[in-house]
Amino acid sequence: MNLSVFPTARDAAAALADHIAGALRTKPDLVLGLPTGRTPVQLYRELAALTERHAVDFSRTTTFNLDEFLGLRPDDPASYRRYMERHLFRKINIDRERIHVLDGSAPDPEAECARYERAIREAGGVDLQILGIGSNGHIGFNEPGDSLMARTHRVTLRPETRRANAALFGGDAGRVPGEALSMGMATILQARSIVLLATGVEKAASVERMIHGPITTRLPASFLQLHADTLVVLDEGAARKLERRTENEERRR
């Protein structure tokens, strides 16, 4: 993996926004995979600011979001579709027909997952996938476990993941749906290029294990070690354990 460390979360987000803008200048019809959660909020602010300055053009971009809560309608205030509208889609010049988000209210969740996979294939696959990482090492809603699903699927959320999303539900983790729909690991890893953004000291342990630990289903993000074009963008907090590891290795020499 390639690694870039920045002093602050805002610096990291601004650098990634510039990276995305550069990719769009190279390929205006880019297929872009997008995450949700707390970490990408600053990234989306930076992309909105670039759009306002006419420094980036999303008019031909196609987007696919990683995941959605099961049981929530797209217009539910706590849905990831509404999250994306608030933080990004309303603030950039994207064609609404090119936006793709899983429908958590679909009557047949398995059929919705299959539909999503077909849509990704018909778009030619994801060119640039942006990811975050959970404190337990999940990416998308691919949770640690004995095995991982390859394709878009229905998943049961772990308690720590529900707690991490409580802010969308008035701070009450008990109101966070127990299930979600998520791109699978093979779908994510088939993106031509991947950038993972992680900020804050609470992500430092999972980042260190992702980069230096074994590839294991108990830390889904570790599978990014297998990808040929992955960039990890961190602030100093998320890189803290990497820095300590380097210091310890230098002392042993």
Image: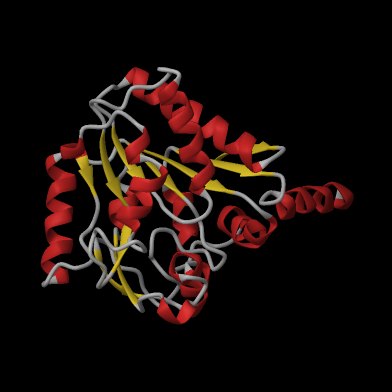
**Farthest-out residue, bottom:** 174
Position of residue 86 relative to residue 169, above or below, is: above
Residue 41 lies left or right of residue 177; in this view the side is right
Q: Residue at x 29, y 58 (%)?
A: 183
Q: Is residue 218 visible?
A: no
- Quadrant assignment, res 117: bottom left
Position of residue 115 relative to residue 18, above or below, is: below
Q: Report the front residue among 248 and 219.
A: 219
**Residue 225 position in % (x across, y down):** 48, 50
Q: Residue at x 34, y 31 (%)?
A: 92
Q: How has the structure been colored for display?
A: secondary structure
**Residue 127 position in % (x across, y down):** 30, 35
Q: Residue at x 18, y 62 (%)?
A: 113
Position of residue 167 relative to residue 179, above or below, is: above
**Farthest-out residue, right:** 251
Task: Give the mark count.
Answer: 0
Q: Report the front residue among 199 and 186.
A: 199
Residue 226 lies left or right of residue 134; in this view the side is left
**Residue 212 position in % (x across, y down):** 62, 55
Q: Is residue 18 visible?
A: yes
**Residue 249 position in % (x across, y down):** 80, 51
Q: Report the front residue among 219 and 17.
A: 17
- Quadrant assignment, res 25: top left
